[in-house]
Amino acid sequence: MKAIEIREKYLTFFKNHGHTVIPSAPLIPENDPSVLFTTAGMQPLVPYLLGENHPAGTRLTDYQKCVRTVDIDEVGDNRHLTYFEMLGNWSLGDYFKEESIQMSFDFLTKELGIPIEKLSVTCFTGDNDCPRDEVSAECWKKAGIPEDHIYFYGKDDNWWIAGEEGPCGPDTEMFYDTGKPACSENCQPSCDCGKYVEIWNNVFMEYFKDAKGNYTKLSKKNVDTGLGLERMAMLLQGKETPYDTELFAPIMQKLEELQKVDDIQSRRVVAEHLRSSMMIICDGGRPSNLDRGYVLRRLIRRMIRHMNKLAINLEEISTLIELNVDNLKEMYPDLSKNKEIIQSVMLEEKDKFIKTLTHGEKEFSKEKQKAEEQGKKQIDGKVVFRLYDTYGFPPEVTAELAKENGMTVDLEEFNRLFKEHQEKSRLGSEQKFKGGLADQNEKTIAYHTATHLLHQALRTILGDHVKQSGSNITEERLRFDFTHPQKMTKEEIKQVEDLVNEQIQKDLPVTCEEMNYDEAKESGAIGLFTDKYGEKVKVYTIGNFSKEICGGPHVTHTGDMGTFKIKKEESSSSGIRRIKAVLV
Ligand code: SER
């Protein structure tokens, strides 16, 4: 069964069991600076798991695009992925253990046709915070799982929470027996020898854990489940790794054709990082030296290093992107729409990295010589950090180079310095978040409305690929960042200015309506569609020209705003342009 069929079957099954299918939230959470990427299906739903009402009801299902990067260095083995898709179903104070377990059992055995004997399940064994989960075990037995396929484990295995604080609870996990021989007499689902593969996780979210580690009961009992699509496809197809499924096979094959040096691990790294970078760029991510931008940069650069290892010409990145869009467009139609941007961001990053490699390698040679003169076999963490900070030279590359020269690097010190640096930038960006629209006066309000006019004008003149990626307003000017692959021409700038000024001259009325996010989306409003289904939002409409989700405030009529003038159009980061404009 192909991955896309599994997805379809899943959504249909839960739809038939009273669930509303909701769309995947973007990989980049727009309004949640606490996480870099969406890492689980439940993440966009946290407010509802904590008790808010969801407009789509109490039974939801979706597929969610996810990125997890903790294991980035493991990618290349036979199972770790940075990008993956999670299928999920939720009960928000609706059904609980029995129905959830029965549905999972039916889906696995009837829809996917997995023989019962291939399944094992695990339940929470109980501790001071929460009793042993006999109920789940009973439900499994009732559904048809034999007792000797039911295991009990502690918090390490059968408890789920995203991070340190938040909604959480005991979970019951389902495992697929690959049929490989047991590694020992004690081989169990918790064993990581590869015989048992976890396929689905149902979390019974009854608790909230606060920052101090105290557990309290939530107002409602929820169910949150997650099923990894790539893994399921691999198992159902009887493949050894996700790379052997249709999701990766065409790219893997192409890499084999192109390579001059054979290395399966490197081929996997290239195939995996190519897909995750493309998905992140598609959702508006751009490489940079900060936070999620740095994760993307690392993914692309790691991919390039492994292309180098395979001795594949880097110009082939273009071909690989083309091939991957073709292969994945049915599952992710946005990839086709954003193909040009993906190409230009990846290629630009490649060019930057080539420069970095050359500079960094020179610097490294100097440092190596210094170390040798001092009789040292180790490169200082400070040096690794300087190479990273000044030359954009990734620490893992420095470590690799050192190794090739019979040396090591002080990664511990590097990590300490890197953390310090991260902390500084985190504080910096919190300050930035606070900036926003705190000070309102006539001038800033007019700039705010001008920002909406500009946003729409850019979309009209340049195309619908234009998306806001940042905005900052002072009394003197507006600054607007947006996705667009190349420099705007003089004519385009003029056209945008003219279009904005036309709207100002028309003295258009600005009106505001409150509606749900999904209604807003349906009404054609632009803006940050993220994880806020069901939340009431304000939609500001300017004549027939612009409709945008926004907190306001705005002018009531465009007439008195002045004349709009673009002062500067420049690059902000890869694939993102920045406009500074004034009203005079
Ligand atoms: N939140 C749980 C997980 O990520 C189940 O969806 O595994």
Image (cartoon, grey):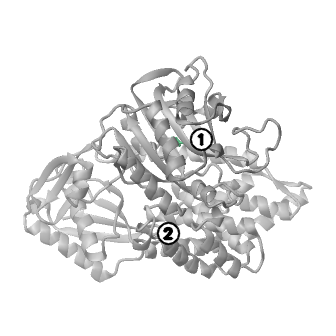
Name the N-terminal-most of marks 1 and 2.
1
Residue 91 in the image, given as x and y percentages of width and height: 39, 37
Whether residue 532 appears in this view of the structure is yes
Instruction: Using the image, determine if residue 104 lies above or below residue 259.
Output: above
User: Looking at the rendering, in which quadrant would you find the C terminus?
Assistant: bottom left
Nearest the viewer among 384 and 74 is 74
| Label 2, residues with CA under 10 Å away: few <14, some 14-19, many ≥20 | some
Residue 64 in the image, given as x and y percentages of width and height: 45, 52
Q: Is residue 77 left or right of residue 212?
A: right
Residue 248 in the image, given as x and y percentages of width and height: 60, 68
Callout 1: SS: strand
In this view, the mark in front (1 or 2): 1
Looking at this rendering, what residue extends furthest in the top direction?
A: 128
Q: Can you tell which mark lies on residue 576?
A: none
The residue under the point 65% across, 72% down is 252
Q: Can you tell which mark lies on residue 174?
A: 1
Q: Amino acid at mark 1?
A: Met
Nearest the viewer among 542 and 271 is 271
Q: Is residue 40 left or right of residue 269?
A: left
User: Looking at the rendering, in which quadrant would you find the N terminus?
Assistant: bottom right
Q: Is residue 497 left or right of residue 61?
A: left
The residue carrying mark 2 is: 328
